[in-house]
Image: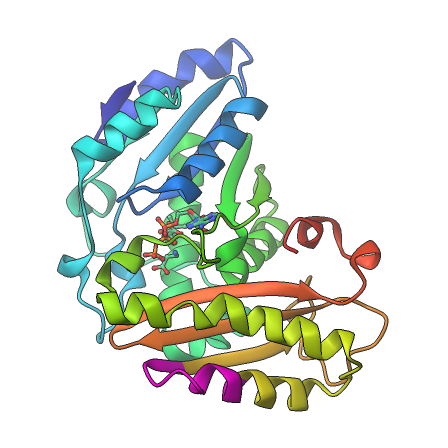
Amino acid sequence: MHTFTTIAELRAALAPHRLDGRTIGLVPTMGYLHVGHMELVRRARADNDIVVATIFVNPLQFGANEDLSRYPRDLARDQAMLEAEGVHYLFAPGVKDMYPQPMETVVDVPKLGAELEGSVRPGHFAGVATVVTKLFNIAGPDRAYFGEKDFQQLTIIRRMVADLAQPVEVIGVPTVREADGLACSSRNVYLSPQERAAAAIVPRALDEAERLVAAGETDARKLEAAVRAFIQSEALAEPEVVAVRDPQTLADVTTIGEKPVLLLLFVRFGSTKLLDNRVLGPKNAMPEHAKKVA
Ligand SMILES: Nc1ncnc2c1ncn2[C@@H]1O[C@H](COP(=O)(O)OP(=O)(O)OP(=O)(O)O)[C@@H](O)[C@H]1O
Ligand SMILES: CC(C)(CO)[C@@H](O)C(=O)[O-]
Ligand code: BAL
């Protein structure tokens, strides 16, 4: 595996592969890799001739209340993991490599980006859309891989690609979980032992929601209130977003009927944010990219 830090190096490395008609899969990450990232890499390896992983902690995604410098890093460990999975190229730019001058250009999906997680992380999704567009322009992938753990992010990227006719197939990868059901996530390392034990309430809240829907709950607001109360039964958990939405558009849902719905959770444990989601309802009517979520 070759590691590049500059845009020019990566472009030069990929050009001959593209000329020879080889397909390129892109796996964008912020590093400090775990088994969830490795599932994206494995999918990219299975689908493409060449796999490019990126590691970039994007300052445009961090709001004033989150310390960018605190984000976990271990490049040597990440390189070993990616090499072992057969990744061909790692693009690991510094901020100045990615943004040699202050960015005047912003890519945004404002409506989808301002609600749900965006309502408690203002500007975050504009940062995501901007850096993902730049990574697409740099690497020119045929396919790009994103986790369904970050469902709103995945939905926003899909909408951006559709709206801008970006020539990239966006692949959603099901969430990889710890033994107790907690979604693997780099920020889990921020959790104290007590917070980590408490965080099991998140996957359990999804199970509770599934039980309530199976028991006949059709009112989305009542389901949200019941799930919020369930999460708050854990003193260390602060449910900031509990939302029942359409799995494809993230549009609000008021009544849970025959169509599947998506329950999105954004729960804080101290200073650590944890995301999770699950499609609820009849699984045979799920949209393609949501089918694998359940
Ligand atoms: N448990 C997981 N299962 C599937 N995909 C995942 C998982 N965790 C992260 N991903 C995906 O990996 C890609 C890189 O995400 P990122 O580097 O932000 O990791 P992260 O674990 O989500 O970090 P953080 O905890 O800071 O949000 C994203 O597309 C994300 O959705
Ligand atoms: C998509 C992404 C690489 C953009 O920085 C980041 O948000 C992430 O890793 O999910
Ligand atoms: N995991 C998506 C990137 C972020 O939440 O900062």
Q: Which residue is drawn at 47% across and 51% down?
A: 177
Work out whether 50 lies above or below 265.
above
User: Seen from this angle, which residue lies furthest left?
Assistant: 69
Residue 29 lies in quadrant: top left
Q: Residue at x 48, y 58 (%)?
A: 181
Percent coordinates x, y for residue 43 in the rendering: 54, 31
User: Seen from this angle, which residue lies furthest top?
Assistant: 20
Residue 103 appears in the figure: no
Magenta includes 235? yes
Side (left or right) of 108 relative to 31: right
Query: Which quarter of the rendered picture does the N terminus lie within?
Result: top left
- Between residues 120 and 223, which one lies in front from this camera angle? 223
Side (left or right) of 211 relative to 88: right
Q: Residue at x 51, y 40 (%)?
A: 145
Work out whether 31 lies above or below 90.
below
Percent coordinates x, y for residue 167 in the rendering: 58, 37
- Between residues 61 and 277, which one lies in front from this camera angle? 277
How many numbered markers are drawn?
Answer: 0
Magenta stretch bounds: 228-238
Percent coordinates x, y for residue 259 in the rendering: 82, 68
Percent coordinates x, y for residue 224 in the rendering: 60, 85
- Between residues 99 and 82, which one lies in front from this camera angle? 82
Magenta includes 237? yes
